[in-house]
Image (spheres, rainbow, N blue to C red):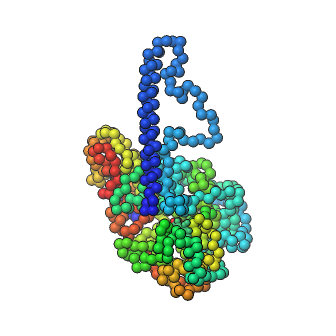
Amino acid sequence: MFTSKRMVIAMAATALLAACAAPTLAPAPTKSPNLGRLATAQEIAAADISIPPDGSGLPAGGGDVRQGAAVYAGKCVSCHGEKGVGKPADALAGGIGSLATATPLRTVGSYWPYATTLFDYVRRAMPIQSPKSLTNDEIYAVTAYLLNLNGIVAENAVMNAQSLPQVKMPNRDGFIDYSRR
Amino acid sequence: MTDHHDPVSDAVSAVATADAARERRNFLKRGAAGLAAAAAAATTARAADPIGGDFPEWSTKIGTPLRGYGQPSRFEAPVQRYVQKAFGDLAPGTGGARAPIERLEGVITPNGLHFDRSHNGAPDIDPAKHQLLIHGLVKKPLSFSIADLLRYPMVSRMHFIECSGNSGLNLAPQPPQLPAGVMHGLVSCADWTGIPLALLLDEAGVEPAGKWLLAEGADSAAMSRSIPLGKCYDDAIVALYQNGERLRPEQGYPVRLLLPGWEGNMNVKWLRRLKVTAGPTHTKDETSRYTDPQPDGRARQFTFEMGAKSVILRPSSTMSMQGAGLYEISGIAWSGGGRIARVEISTDSGATWKDAVLQGQAMPKSLVRFRLPWEWNGQATALQSRATDEKGNTQPSRAAFRAEFAPDIRFHNNSIVSWAVNADGSVKNVYL
C-alpha cells in the first residue's frame, strides 16, 4: 500500500540477482474438464442479492420513514442505540461535515457514498443474530428511516426500487479510486 | 479495536498465567529428576538392577497409542491464537483470532493457528449441499458442486494472507505493550491448492462488457467484495486445500477465493457466488470499511495490494533477554508486490542498518524468514527491521505513514516496527 521508492539502482541489481536465483512457478493449467452445469434463471434470481449503485436487482416493494422507525425500534435499537447514535455496535447516524476534522465520525450518513449499499448490507447481514430474516418492505422502510435520521431524505420519503438509487449521499464524491494504480 | 472490551489483554494474561504454571511444573520436575538421578548414581554399582531408574518415565512405558489425527504436545497448549471479539458476546463471530507469530518459526502457519478474521462466525457448511455459482456478464451462467471442483486441474502456491487491519493497534497514540502476535498477527502463510480462477471464468465465457467480479461468501454476513477482472486472470485461485489438507472452516471450507498479495478481506471465504459486472458493486466492506481516509477528508478506495512489511519476532515486545551475549534476531517479511528482495536490520535505533539473511528462496507474495546474529552488550538500544520488495517498495517510518492519512486511519499500516531492548533485559514496543 504505502510505498516509497528508494535506492532504485541498488534495488534493480538485487532484483536481478533474485530473479536469476528464483525458482520459476509452474505454469497454470489451461484445459478445463468443463463440469459446470448450466444455472437456471430461477436459481440465479434466488442467489443474486447484490445491489450496485444503479439499483439494478432491487426487489419490488417499498417502505416509508414511519414504518422504518417501527422496524428499527423492534430489531435494531438494542445494538445501534436510540436514533442510531451507536453503542454497543456502530453509530448509524451523525458525523456529516466531520471527515476533514481531527475527530472524524464515519457513519452511513457521513461516509457511505451510495444508499444502495445500505439496502444491500442490511438485507444480507442484519440484524446480526438473525440475518436475512427481514422482508424487502422492512428493509426499504428501515433504510428510509436511517436516511431520514441523517437528514438525507424527508420525513415523508418512501424508499423503493425507483427512489433508492436516486438518493444522493453527502459523501458521494469523497472517494479516490485506486483500483488502477 | 480494543475500545469495546479488552479481550486481547484477557487473552494475553491467560497465556501468561498458563506459561507461569508450566514454568513451575518444569521447575518441580527438574528438582525431582535431580533427586532421582542422585539416587540412581548411588546404586549403579549393582549390576542386577534394571537400567530403568536412569531413564525418564516416558522412556519406560508404552506411549500414546496410534491415533487418526495428530495433536500438538500438551506442553504447547499455551500456544493459542489471540481471540478478540470486537463486540463481545453481542456478536461472538465478529472480530479476529490473531496468529501467535512470535511463538512460531519458519514461514508456514499451522492450520489451527492461521489467523481468522470473520464478520459473523464460521458457517458449518455441508460440502454436498454447497454450490459455486458464476453468473452476470457471461455467455453461460454455471453452477459447480464441490465434487466437480475437486476434479479440476490445480496449482499449489505458497502465499501469505494479511488482513489490512493488521498492525492497526500500533497506530494508537501510545505504543501498546502486547505480544507481537496481538498487534501484528493478522497475517499467516500457507501452501494453498486450488483451481486457477481464469479456468472457471473461461468456461463461463466472460462478455466483453465484464470488467469486475463480485465475490460473495455463504456465511451469515454474506461477505462480498468487488475485484477487477485483471487480478482474476492474473494469479487468483479458487482454493480447496490449505497446507495439504482441505480448508479449515475458519479459512472458508469448503472453498475460498485467494487473491495473492491483496488485502485479506477480499479473499472471500465460503465462496458461493461470483458475478461478472461492468463496475464495482460498492459493498459495505469496500466503502464503509477497508478504505483509507486522508487528512483532507477524502478516502482512498480499492487499495488492494498489501505493502512491503517485516517484523522482528525474536526478541519482541513482552519478552525478556537473559543477559548480554549472542542472540539470533529472527522475524518474517512479506509484500503484496512480489518477492522480498532484502530485509535490513538496525540494532542501534535506526542509526545503521545491516542486511539480514533470508532463509531459502523468497517466493512471491509469501512470508520469508530472516535472521541475523546479534551480540547484545547489555546496554539499552532499539531493534528495527525494514523490508524492500523486488519492485523497490519499502517500509515507511511510522511518522511518515501517519502523516499521509487521517487521524483515525486503521488499515494498511506497513510502517517500521521498533522494539526497545532495555538494560534490565525487558523488551518494549516503542515509536521511533
Q: Nearer the viewer, residue A75 or B425?
A: A75
Q: Choose top left, top right, bottom left or bottom right for residue B418.
A: bottom left
Q: Position of residue B349 (x, y in %)?
A: 29, 52
Number of marks in the image?
0
Nearer the observer, A32 or A109? A109
Compared to B309, does B227 lie above or below?
below
Residue A124 visible in the current orientation: yes
- Measuring from the top left, give residue A104's x and y in whole percent: 40, 73
Q: Quadrant of residue B21?
A: top left
Name the one closer to the observer, B156 or B83: B83
Residue drawn at (57%, 53%), measured in percent from left and top? Answer: B192
Residue occupying the point 37% across, 56% down = B176
- At x 37% / y 48%, what residue is drawn? B318
User: Which sits in the foreground, B39 or B123?
Assistant: B39
Q: Residue B287 location, x and y as percent?
A: 50, 72
Q: Is residue B54 above or below residue A129?
A: above
